Image (tube, rainbow, N blue to C red):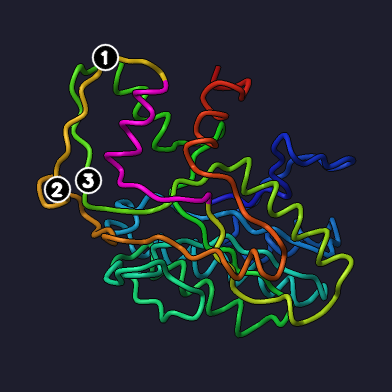
Amino acid sequence: MAIQSWRCYNALEVKGLDLEECDITNQKETTETIEDYNPRIIIHTAAYTDVDGNELSPEKAFAVNAGGTENVARVTKELGATLFYISTDYVFDGKKDKPYKETDSPNPANIYGQSKLDGEKVIQALLERHLILRTSWLFGPKGKNFVTAILEKTKENETLQVVDDQIGSPTYTLDLAKAIKVLLSTINSKLSTEVYGIYHITNSGSCSWYEFAREIISLKQLNTQILPVSSAEIKRPAQRPKMSILDNSKLTNIFNVKLRFWKEALKHFLFENKETK
C-alpha cells in the first residue's frame, strides 16, 4: 500500500511538494521517504479499505492498517512531529441505539475495523501528539466510493438492490479536508496537549445506504428503481455494523467545526465538483 506525502483537494494548497509514494509496510522505505521532508505534521491516510477484502486477506489487512501505521508512527516519533490518523466508524459493532462518542468502547465486527483499531492503539502507545480522526462512508472525486458506484450501476441496470438496515453518515472528502485544514491551523497556533486525542468527524445527519442511493438517483433525475433489501439477503464476507453514526460534538466544542448536512454535500459533489459534473 502507498502513503502519499500529501493528498490535496480544492480546499488545500501545498506549494513545493511533489506527490511521492512508498510502501508503508516497508519500515526502511517509509522512514526514508518521510525523513526526506522532515515534516512537523504528518497526515496518515494510507489504508487497505476494501472491507470484504480485509476479511478474505486478514494478513494483508493487519500488515497495512496496523503494521504500516506503526511504521508511520515510529518515524513520526523520531522526528518529534504530530500525526493525524484517519480511522473509521467500523471500530464499533453497531449495537448502540444512539450516535457513538469518542469515549465509547470500540468493539469491531470485522477485520477491517479491528485492523484500523490496532492502528489507533499503536499510535496512542507511541505518540503523545496525535489526532485520531474517525470518519465514515466517504465519497469524493478520487478513488472508489458508493456514489460513483451507484451511478456506474445505473448505466447497466434498471433496478438496483441496496441494503436498508445499515445506518451511518455519508461524508464528503472535500468537507473532511476543509475540517482538517482548520485543525491544522489550530494545532499550529495552540500547542496544547489538551487538543490531542480521538475525534469523530462526519457530515451532519444520517441515513441508510438505501436512502443514500435514493438521494443520488433523485438528484440526478434518473429512472433507475431502487429496492431495499436486508444485509442478510446480500451475503458479504464481512459483517457491517447496523448503526455507526458518530457523535461530532467534541469536534464542535473544541475546534468549532461542524460539517454541513450530507445531502447538501452530496449535491455539491454531483453538480459543483469539476470532476463529477
Disc 1: which residue: 223
| Outermost left residue | 233
Q: CA distance from mark 2 to mark 3?
A: 6 Å
Which circle marks residue 164 in the picture? 3
What's the magenta region? 203-219
Neighbour class for label 2 at 10 Å: few (<14), some, many (≥20)? some
- Left or right: residue 122 versus residue 91 is right
157 and 80: which is toward the camera: 157
- Left or right: residue 27 versus residue 60 is right
Neighbour class for label 3 at 10 Å: few (<14), some, many (≥20)? some
Amino acid bearing label 2? Ser
151 and 102: which is toward the camera: 102
The residue lying at 70 percent from left, 47 percent from top is 178
| First-in-chain label (3 vs 1) | 3
Pair 1/2: label in front: 1
Which circle marks residue 92 in the picture? none
| First-in-chain label (1 vs 2) | 1
In the picture, which quadrant includes the C terminus?
Answer: top right
Q: Pinpoint residue 168: horizontal percent, then vertical percent.
A: 38, 53
- Left or right: residue 208 versus residue 171 is left
